[in-house]
Image (cartoon, rainbow, N blue to C red):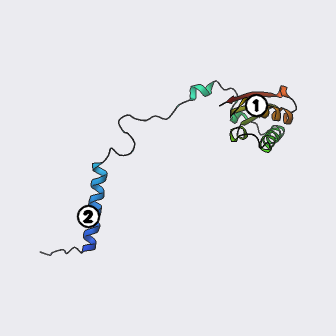
Amino acid sequence: MKTISITPRLFTLYSTLALASLCVISFPGYGQDQSTPSTAPDNSAKNKKHDITADKQTNASADLQVTAQIRKAIIAEKSLSTYAHNVKIITLNGMVTLKGPVKSDSEKQTVADLAAKAAGGADRITNDITVK
């Protein structure tokens, strides 16, 4: 019969692996609570009522140009918050819809005014911006 000698280094490696496996097996309670299954938030019902969404934006040259002009005007206004700078701008056949949160009523009005100026009039703007 052949005997196997274990070096101190190999013994340390085996011991570490054994201890690590015990920790993983012995302490399943650490981390996320597994008692109730988690589900992803579903806001589909809320989104169904939105007629105009960003995927409705056309690739028509005129619509893209209006959207770009509005975005440039909004970004150029340094007094606006990051929320206002990130408002969704959806242009469809020359009509613009603004969506998203802003910090105040004055920001909402400023964004709408900038969009109206770039789009050619307030009658071309639908302001669906919300105040956070």
Which amino acid type is shown beneath numbered disc 1? Ser
Residue 46, given in percent of the width and then of the height, sits at: 59, 26
Farthest left residue in view: 1
Residue 48, given in percent of the width and then of the height, sits at: 62, 26
Taking the spot 68% from the left edge, 29% from the top edge, the residue there is 130
Figure quadrant of residue 85 = top right
Mark 2 vs 1: CB contact within 8 A: no
Figure quadrant of residue 57 = top right
Q: In this picture, is 71 found above or below 3?
A: above
State the separation of the CA atoms marked 2 and 1: 66 Å
Farthest right residue in view: 120
How busy is the neighbourhood of tag 1: few (under 14 within 10 Å), some, or many (20 plus)?
Answer: few
Residue 107, given in percent of the width and then of the height, sits at: 75, 33
Left or right of 32 in this view: 61 = right
Element at label 1? helix
How busy is the neighbourhood of tag 2: few (under 14 within 10 Å), some, or many (20 plus)?
Answer: few
Which amino acid type is shown beneath numbered disc 2? Ser
Figure quadrant of residue 58 = top right
Give me the disc on residue 106: 1
Residue 30, given in percent of the width and then of the height, sits at: 35, 46
Q: Quadrant of the N terminus?
A: bottom left
Residue that label 2 marks: 15
Counting residues from the start of the chain, the first of labels 2 and 1 encountered is 2
Q: In this picture, is 10 found above or below 110?
A: below
Farthest top residue in view: 49
Element at label 2? helix
